[in-house]
Structures are given as C-alpha cells and as structure tokens.
Image (cartoon, helix red, strand yellow):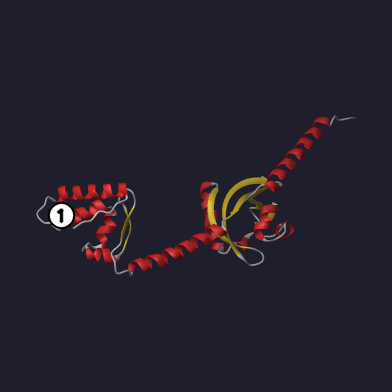
Amino acid sequence: TYTDTTERKKGEQEIQESAKRLRTILDSCPNGIDITAIDSQEMLFCNPKLAEIMHASQEDLLGHSITPLWRDPAERTRFWKKFQDQGYLYAEEAEQIRPDGSAFWVLFSWEQIEFAGQKALITWYHDITERKQAEAELAQSTAKLNTAITNMPSGILVMDGDHNIVLYNNRYCQLFNVPPEVVEANRNLYDVLLFQTDRGDYGDLDPREYLNQLYDGLEKAAATGSSYVVE
C-alpha cells in the first residue's frame, strides 16, 4: 500500500521556510527580543540584539529564568497583573539587571503567543539607559537652578508666549505682595494682575481697564522684543 505524501512534505517544507524567514527577521531586528515560557518563565529564544543589550551571549541567556533580570521582582508582578487585565503591555519602562550585575533601563512591550507548542510571552526591548541618565542629569540641573532662583535677591517671573507663568520665585511674591497660592492657582499673568487690580494696587483707576492697557503694553513689548516699564 502506498500513500502519497507529496502535499504533506510540501506543507512541512513551507512551514520550515516560513520559520526560517521569521527567524531571520527576529535576528536582524534593531530591538532586543526574547520569547519566554509563561509557566516556567524560561527563556526559549532571544535575538542577537538582546544579547548585546544584556552584555551576554545568546547561549548564556537561553534556558534560564528571566525573573533574576528584574531589579524589583515585585514590579514584574505588577506588570504581569496589568498584562492579564488588558491582554498586552505596550511601551512600559522598567529597570533591569544584566547577568554581570550592571543595571539598565528598557522600554518594553509584551504579547502572548504560541511557541514550540506552549503558551509563551514575546518581549520587545529598547534600551533607554542613556535617555534615563540624561533625564536624571536634567532633573539634577533643574533642581540646582530652582534653588539658585529661589534664593536670588531679585524677583523673577518667567512666562511663555501665552503669558502662562512657567517660573517664579518667592522674592517676586514678596515684592508684589502676591501670595504664592494665587500664582499657583492661576498660573497666568492676566489672572495674577487681575488679583492685584481688584485689590486696589493701582489706585482709583478702573482695574480692568488699566489691566487691559498694561496687558496690551506687555504683548507689544513681547512682539517687538523691547522693554516695557511699569511705574
């Protein structure tokens, strides 16, 4: 008895070729990728880029649990809960630990797939360590700048093009007798000046009329790059 297996062989060949193409795509991807078994958390696949990010070889990573790679395992538990609730994770940030003990930051996404006959998780990694370091340095510089501005003997008020207040110091509030909570509540020069005119800071003049004149003068000065003196 003979059975024609031509179609079956052809199907198997197509599957093998498709798997080979997929492997080529994953291996050449500029982002790190791993596939881990959901039950055991064992790494079943990783591409060269992930090995580069991890400062390790693919052989060193495959077959090992990914749990030790998390700086805070409890954080992974929180992410896993979120993943179960919505069925995916997209562009989340986390700090992880390489096998050599060095820390790094990644932007990652999770999707559930079937791999080698079992439920698995495919993770896409993008190393954002340099960005996080730059953010930390910027935050440190900003904190120093804010400290310097706060302690300056001169009053400072910085606005954007729409006259929204983006920065001020305590000396400004002291000079104009404006409570900080008024600035925080309004965050726009017009509203702060309205508080002052309603309080009677500009004498018997109609407060809103005077304020409109003042505001027009400030806008013209901003448009021409000239100074506007308020007496």
Camera-side residue: 144 or 223?
A: 223
Is residue 58 depicted above or below 26 in this figure? below
Q: Which quarter of the figure is the C terminus placed in?
A: bottom left
Q: Residue furthest left?
A: 204
From where the camera sits, is residue 76 visible? no
In the rendered image, the quadrant that contains the N terminus is top right
Residue 205 location (% of width, % of height): 11, 52
Looking at the image, the residue that sits furthest to the right is 1
Left or right: residue 115 versus residue 212 is right
Which quarter of the figure has residue 68?
bottom right
What secondary structure is found at the residue carrying circle 1?
helix
Left or right relative to 207: residue 36: right
Identity of the residue drawn at 20% across and 53% down: 194
Residue 94 on image: x %, y %: 55, 58
Q: Is residue 148 left or right of residue 46?
A: left
Residue 116's spot in the image, x, y percent? 71, 47
Compared with 211, 60 (above or below) is: below
Which residue corresponds to the image point at 24% horizontal and 58% vertical from the top-left?
182
> Is residue 188 found left or right of 144 in the rendered image?
left
Reply above or below: 222 against 176.
above
Disc 1 crowd, CA 10 A, few/some/many (<14, 14-19, 20+): some
Picture quadrant of residue 66? bottom right
The residue at which mark 1 appears reads as: 198
Does the image show residue 104?
Answer: yes
| Residue 173 vs residue 217, the one in the foreground | 217
Residue 188 in the image: state x and y as whole percent.
Answer: 28, 52
Amino acid type of the residue that numbered disc 1 sits on in the rendered structure: Asp
Q: How many marks?
A: 1
Q: Which quarter of the picture shows residue 230?
A: bottom left
